[in-house]
Image (cartoon, grey):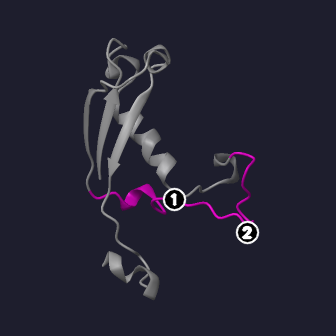
Amino acid sequence: MSVLLLVAPNSPHLLAKGDIDNRMKTLLDGLRMPQQKSELLDLHDLGNLERPIYVLMEDDSQVAKLSVEYDTYLAASDADIKNDVVNAIIDVQIRPTLITIDNTLYL
C-alpha cells in the first residue's frame, strides 16, 4: 500500500500536528473492518446484514508493505487551507482471501 498525502499550501506543516506513525495508524484503522460496535457510527449495526459495510481489509495486519509520501496540494481552495484539509491518494494491491467466481479477476 502506498499513500500520498497532499497538503494545502500555506497550511501548517503536516508533521507539525502529530507524527506520521499515528496518522497512518488512524488511516489504517479507518480502512479495516470494525471489530467492536463502539467503532461504528449509529448508522450501522454489526448484526444487521441488510446494510453491508464495505471495507478494504479485514484486519490491518494484512498490510505487508506501507510507503508514505506527502506533497503540496496545489488545487486547494481557501476552505481547504482554513480547515487544514489533507487529501490522501491510496494505492493498494487487492488479493482475495476467499476465491470465488466473482473475484477470480483479482488473482
Q: CA distance from mark 2 to mark 1?
A: 16 Å
Region rendered in magenta: 41-64
SS label for mark 1: loop
Label count reads 2
Residue 37 position within the rendered picture, expressed as x and y whole percent measured from the top left: 69, 53
Q: Name the residue type under label 1.
A: Val
Occupied quadrant, residue 16? top left
- Residue 1 visible in the current orientation: yes
Q: Viewed as shown, does residue 53 lie left or right of 4?
A: right
Quarter in which the C terminus is drawn: bottom left
User: Considering only order in the chain, which callout, 1 or 2, is on the residue closer to the N terminus?
Assistant: 2
The dominant secondary structure in magenta is loop
User: Compared to 14, does 100 lie above or below?
Assistant: below
Residue 105 position within the rendered picture, expressed as x and y whole percent measured from the top left: 34, 79
Which residue is label 2 attached to? Answer: 50
Residues 24 and 4: in front is: 4
Which residue is label 1 attached to? Answer: 55
Residues 63 and 69: in front is: 69
Residue 44 lies in the magenta stretch:
yes
Residue 47 lies in the magenta stretch:
yes
How crowded pointer 2 is (Cα within 10 Å; few <14, some 14-19, many 20+) is rated as: few
User: Compared to 31, does 59 lie above or below?
Assistant: below
Report the residue at 63% width, 47% height from top. 39
Report the residue at 44% width, 88% height from top. 101
Q: Name the residue type under label 2.
A: Glu
